[in-house]
Image (cartoon, rainbow, N blue to C red):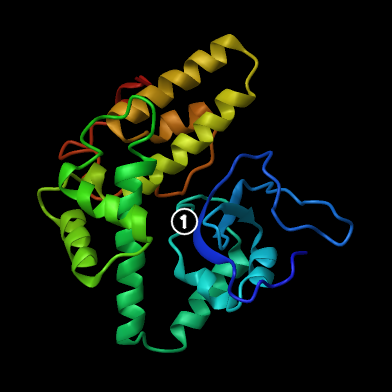
Amino acid sequence: MTQAQHGGWIPVRKDFVDLDTRCHARAATGRHHGFPDGRAYILRDARGDEYPFGEACARAAVLHPEVLEQVPDYTERDVVRQADALDAVIASASRRRPTSADRDAAQRLAAIRYLVLRMEKVAAVPRVQPTVRFAPLQDVYEQFQRSGDLGRAQVSRILAIERSPATPPRLRATNLLDVYTAHVKLERLIAASNRLDNIRFLRGLHDWLARQLVLSAAQIAAAGIEMHPQAFSAAGVWGPDDARPSDSGQLF
């Protein structure tokens, strides 16, 4: 695989990638491995270009592998998780109390993830409802695009918006992660399908997701996608009456 670049590679995020994407690193045979689970670490080179890496390849490419745990993870709500890796992270975190620096770092990652989800990833879903992109965050988002980082005041501002009672539950971080995850999975199914009726059905579900920012358990099952067991179940996302499409036996 690629030799460590002694700080030349900068971890940016963990994200979904197309299923035909190949790792930027090469094995000893000269081949690039793929990403069967559709997730990769995205690293930036010295020129500012971004490339996908598998976890082992990313660890070999960066000077301090632990920095891979310090990038926003947009795949966190994907049900297909590496259970052993997740257990290792939980065990490591439980062995010591988080320091003030740990808490600051966690807040920074949460703010970056929310900012990018709301202003870029979910905002880019075709026909998504316009409330996703939030004008008061535009200046912060543009500055983040230029610098790649957030100051403490910006972190506080973003998290205050995400946690504000004025922010609808469907526009909070967990639900936006579910929307982004479902969007990726539906897009993959649509691209892979060769049946017109199935494509129309999946596009109908995708349009519903874009407009409503939720999917019911019945819709998820009908689409045939795997989602987090608690997908779209965050407090308040279905409103006070919890009126889901499955309640009436209809998908739309």
Image quadrant holding the N terminus, namely: bottom right
Q: Which residue is rendered at x = 36% and y = 84% of the image?
A: 98
Q: Which residue is rendered at x = 53% and y = 69% of the image?
A: 68
95 over 81 or under it: above or below: below
Q: Nearer the viewer, residue 6 or 105?
A: 6
Image quadrant holding the C terminus, namely: top left
- Asked if residue 72 can be seen in this view, the reply is yes
* Residue 245 shown left or right of residue 131 in the figure: right
Image location (x, y in percent) of residue 205 = 42, 24
Amino acid at pointer 1:
Glu
Image location (x, y in percent) of residue 145 = 35, 53
* Residue 227 shown left or right of residue 4 in the figure: left
Image location (x, y in percent) of residue 91 = 52, 80
Q: Which residue is mark 1?
A: 76
Quarter assignment of residue 101: bottom left
Q: Nearer the viewer, residue 80 or 171?
A: 171
Residue with the most extreme top position: 196
Classed neighbour count for the residue bearing mark 1: other residues with Cα under 10 Å, few (<14), some (14–19), many (≥20):
some
Disc 1 is placed on an element classified as: loop
Q: Nearer the viewer, residue 200 or 150?
A: 150
Q: Which residue is rendered at x = 64% and y = 63% of the image?
A: 55
